[in-house]
């Protein structure tokens, strides 16, 4: 808790953080909280009961796809899911820049043939051109800066008929109640860092469907680009929900223990006001980006 990094020092002084500052911040957060994304994201479900890892894994068609890469694979949960579904029919690879996340992934996938690499998604010289049928990026594209280099690298690594698919933060207003929860968290964070939110992690263009569409089309010319907004729900008792959500927002990690607890109290109050029979619902807006190459079945 209370992460200090090159990135927080920059926003404290009102200066635009650089890509290196961002990398330092993400590394510090993940070294101290490895595995935090899956702890929450696994339990957020769409109207059909699927979580966002499943929404990506569903894209794989074993008739046509064999080589799959996960960019920003974190603790390896998506690779694990692909392995459970398809086993040795797939050749799975994962890349992440953070060592603590990769340690979790290595343990989880030790019994499989999955190959894991440490590196930045912007420049993956370890892979040859056109190596992959499918490239995934689950909840990591928003953090990647420069993001254009990640898209260009993905295009280079993808076969002509391949698919690039990502889960990305959606429009803040697309899910009922999301903005209120976001604002509670940011109100607490902005007491300490007034510029948190003015400067965000990663390239802000990725956070809106229109800009994301433009950005992707510039790199993936002649590919079919589809962005689907999806709302994911997490139902739990207000106390549980407040803690789970607080542990998922990167912004929370810059708060001290006592500041974090004040925020939890406010979140819990919000969910108590909105509960039914002791259960509250949090809805998270995401976009599912699917970029399909020529001849993709
Ligand atoms: C929010 S976590 C998501 C982890 C995993 N995909 C999941 O959803 O469970 C983002 C991950 O992206 C990684 N990451 C961020 N920027 C990266 C970059 N430029 N290159 C490689 N990994 C990156 C972080 O280290 C972190 O593990």
Image (spheres, grey):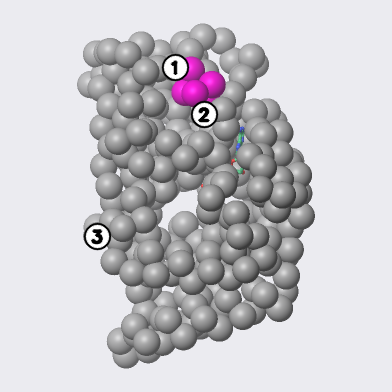
User: Is residue 230 located in the magenta-colored stretch of the structure?
Assistant: no
Q: Name the one closer to the observer, 223 or 58.
A: 223
Q: Secondary structure at mark 2?
A: helix
**Residue assigned mark 2:** 147
For the image shown, how many numbered marks are present on the structure? 3
Q: Secondary structure at mark 3?
A: loop
Q: Name the one closer to the observer, 191 or 23.
A: 191
**Residue assigned mark 1:** 155
Check disc 2: other Cα within 10 Å, few if <14, some if 14-19, many if 20+: many
Q: Residue at x 55, y 39 (%)?
A: 202
Q: Assess mark 2: CB under 8 A from ligand 1?
A: no
Q: Quadrant of ligand 1?
A: top right
Magenta extent: 148-152
Q: Are marks 3 and 2 in contact (CB under 8 Å)?
A: no
Please state if 40 lies on the left or on the right of 48 as rendered. right
Q: Which mark is residue 222?
A: none
Q: Is residue 102 above or below residue 296?
A: below
Residue 228 percent location from the top left of the image = 26, 42
């Amino acid at each position: 808790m209370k992460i200090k990094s090159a990135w927080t020092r920059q926003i404290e002084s009102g200066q635009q953080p650089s890509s290196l500052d961002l990398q330092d911040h993400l590394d510090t957060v993940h070294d101290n909280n490895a595995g935090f994304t899956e702890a929450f994201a696994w339990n957020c479900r769409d109207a059909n009961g699927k979580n966002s890892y499943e929404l990506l894994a569903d894209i794989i068609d074993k008739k046509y796809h064999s080589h799959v890469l996960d960019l920003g694979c974190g603790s390896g949960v998506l690779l694990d899911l692909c392995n459970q579904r398809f086993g040795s029919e797939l050749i799975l690879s994962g890349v992440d820049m953070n060592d603590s996340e990769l340690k979790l992934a290595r343990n989880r996938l030790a019994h499989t043939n999955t190959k894991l690499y440490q590196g930045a998604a912007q420049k993956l010289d370890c892979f040859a051109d056109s190596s992959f049928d499918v490239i995934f990026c689950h909840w990591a594209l928003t953090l990647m800066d420069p993001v254009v280099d990640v898209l260009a690298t993905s295009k280079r690594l993808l076969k002509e008929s391949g698919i690039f698919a990502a889960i990305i933060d959606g429009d803040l207003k697309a899910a009922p109640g999301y903005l209120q929860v976001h604002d509670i968290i940011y109100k607490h964070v902005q007491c300490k860092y007034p510029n948190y939110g003015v400067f965000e992690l990663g390239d802000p263009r990725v956070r809106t469907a229109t800009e994301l569409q433009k950005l992707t089309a510039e790199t993936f010319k002649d590919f079919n680009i589809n962005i689907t907004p999806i709302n994911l729900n997490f139902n739990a008792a207000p106390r549980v929900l407040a803690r789970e959500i607080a542990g998922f927002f990167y912004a929370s990690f810059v708060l001290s223990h006592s500041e974090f607890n004040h925020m939890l109290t406010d979140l819990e109050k919000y969910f108590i006001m909105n509960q039914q029979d002791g259960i509250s619902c949090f809805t998270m807006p995401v976009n599912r980006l699917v970029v399909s190459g020529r001849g993709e079945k």
